Image (spheres, grey):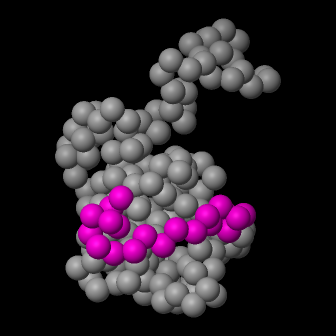
Amino acid sequence: MAAGPALRAQGHEVVAYFYNPNVQPYKELETRLGAFERVCGANDIPSIAEPVYEPERWLKGALDAELRCEYCYRDRLERTAKHAALGGFDAFTTSLLVSPYQKHELARRIGKEEADEMGVEFLYRDMRPEWKESRRRTFELGIYRQKYCGCIFSERDRYLGEPGKEMPKVEGERAQGDSSD
């Protein structure tokens, strides 16, 4: 939420773009689209929304990929770069660079690769310092904040942990599968 105003303060004309085919289930996509529209409205940022919901295509790509996050970032940044190039924009960036929970260097590398492929600049900024302000503003405005990246695998990992990794034990909580009282 703070990235758009921060980029404007640096002299950039900002247009927000929504394309998140990884988000599941459909109601979550609708909720995130609504939050996107509210954030754009609150910051007077023009926006373009492409609320694509193709779970079969996205899941097949993610399951076939060696690294699902790399597949997801590439899918989204390829589409964004193409949209920027065909739309006559000077550059594009990504909100992935705001979150301390995303794979920052992976997003940076893929953004640059897709920019080179499409002949449009990837505007790299480490926007993680803007994250706390973004968080504060969304709470202030009552805007939905997601609890997982959007893909069904992340939703699973949120509750069950990543396969092959042990979940940390939280004081006072029962172990997974423990039904004793």
- The stretch drawn in magenta includes residue 153: no
In the image, residue 89 sits, relative to residue 97, either above or below, namely: below
- Residue 176 lies, in percent from the top left, at 59, 17
Q: Nearer the viewer, residue 77 or 38?
A: 77
Residue 58, above or below 80: above
Which quadrant of the rendered structure holds the N terminus? bottom right
Q: Residue 160, image x and y in percent?
A: 53, 26
Residue range of the region highlighted in magenta in the rendering: 113-132
x and y percent of residue 7 in the render? 58, 81
- Seen in the image, is 77 located left or right of residue 93? left
Q: How many marks?
A: 0
Percent of width and height locating residue 154: 47, 39
Q: Residue at x 68, y 73 (%)?
A: 137
Describe residue 8's horizontal placement relative to residue 112 as left or right: right
Point 45% across, 63% down: residue: 32
Answer whether residue 115 is magenta in the image.
yes
**Residue, x 57% and y 90% (percent of image)?**
11
The residue sitting at 65% across, 15% down in the picture is 175
Q: Is residue 2 above or below residue 87?
A: above
Q: Quadrant of residue 9?
A: bottom right
Q: Quadrant of the C terminus?
A: top right
In the picture as drawn, the residue positioned furthest to the right comes out as 171
The answer to which image quadrant residue 172 occupies is top right
Quadrant of the rendered image containing residue 99: bottom right
Q: Nearer the viewer, residue 104 or 172?
A: 104
Identify whether 99 is placed above or below 24.
Answer: below
